[in-house]
Image (cartoon, rainbow, N blue to C red):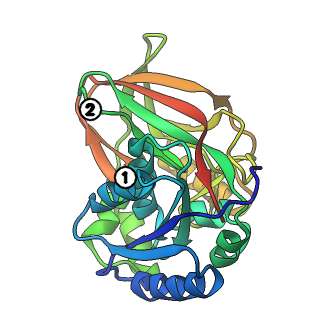
Amino acid sequence: MESPRRFDTITIIFNPNSTGDAPKLAEELLQDLNSALPATTVTMQPTEHAGHAIDLAREAASAGNALVVSVSGDGGYNEVVNGVMASGSDDAVCAVLAAGNANDHSRVTGRKPLAKAITEGQVRRIDLLRISMDETGADPVYAHSYIGFGLTPVVAIDLEKGSKGAIKEMFSVVRTFSKFKPFEIRQSDGKRRSFDSLVFANISQMAKYATLSEAGDHPADGKFEVITFPHMAKWRILLTALRATTKGLGDQPSYTQYRFSTLKPMPYQIDGEVKSVEAATDITIDSVPRALAILG
């Protein structure tokens, strides 16, 4: 753990059109920090469109000795993390105040109320996941919590088509599951394998209830867990999912790098946000040890 930090600037990034309470929570955090840290410049930065938080976070982090706070769910925090990483700043620090439908990262790694954590200034570092796609030429993208292929993004896509809510979520999952088909990839050993789900996890829990592994609450070991559901009968998938939500899936193999190639276009989910990848793309998932400084 680093020595207590005092920041020159604190930037609070939030979505003013959030269906949750992000604007209210951002304003409350602003007031708390102005009271507790009167010598520090604290500003609020509302986002205007998808991806805007990346630009705002990059600019805020470039100022030096900066704290960048995302008042959001996992997806909004993912943008802020990628903006901070793109800034190239060595001393920028990130934090998240949970204000979304999916708050897995905050729930697993959070240790104390955020305003208190910022006031105390106890910074620690965590690993990030990095996904690189050789054929696209695009810059690598970072994930603070997980990257999932198969059932994970397919269910997420279906949920986004309708309103969220416990009953509607349940029916969406059942509907999607009934139509779901496995996907096939070519692994680094050259063999083709079929999966129902493939998740690269930097934290031990996801989707509010599922415990994926026995990994701790501080992802800083330079490795990530790989949770695989090889193609199986659907009743077996349901039993495995039930086990994940009750007693957990137990120990899972950990890696520093995992490589494979897609055979068909397919969606994937990164920290709650759904993206897509083309066929015949070589994908590398890396752990980037202690890449991100955080508070909370």
Residue 59 location, quadrant: bottom left
| x, y percent for residue 143 | 47, 46
| x, y percent for residue 216 | 75, 49
Dot 1 alpha-carbon crowd within 10 angstroms: few under 14, some 14 to 19, many 20 or more: many
Q: Is residue 276 left or right of residue 64?
A: left
Using the image as rendered, state which of residue 150 and residue 59 is in the foreground. Answer: 59
Q: Nearer the viewer, mark 2 or mark 1?
A: 1
Q: Secondary structure at mark 1?
A: helix
| x, y percent for residue 234 | 48, 49
Q: Secondary structure at mark 2?
A: loop
Q: Is residue 62 left or right of residue 106?
A: left
Q: Amino acid at mark 1?
A: Arg
Q: Quadrant where the C terminus lies?
A: bottom right
Residue 51 location, quadrant: bottom left
- In primary-sequence order, the first of circles 2 and 1 is 1
Residue on which the image places disc 2: 138
Cα separation, mark 2 vs mark 1, equals 18 Å
Image point (65%, 33%), residue name: 223
Q: Is residue 21 above or below residue 285?
A: below
Q: Is residue 225 above or below residue 255?
A: below
Residue on which the image places disc 1: 58
Q: Is residue 292 above or below residue 97?
A: above
Q: Give the residue furthest to the top.
A: 190
Q: Amino acid at mark 2?
A: Ala
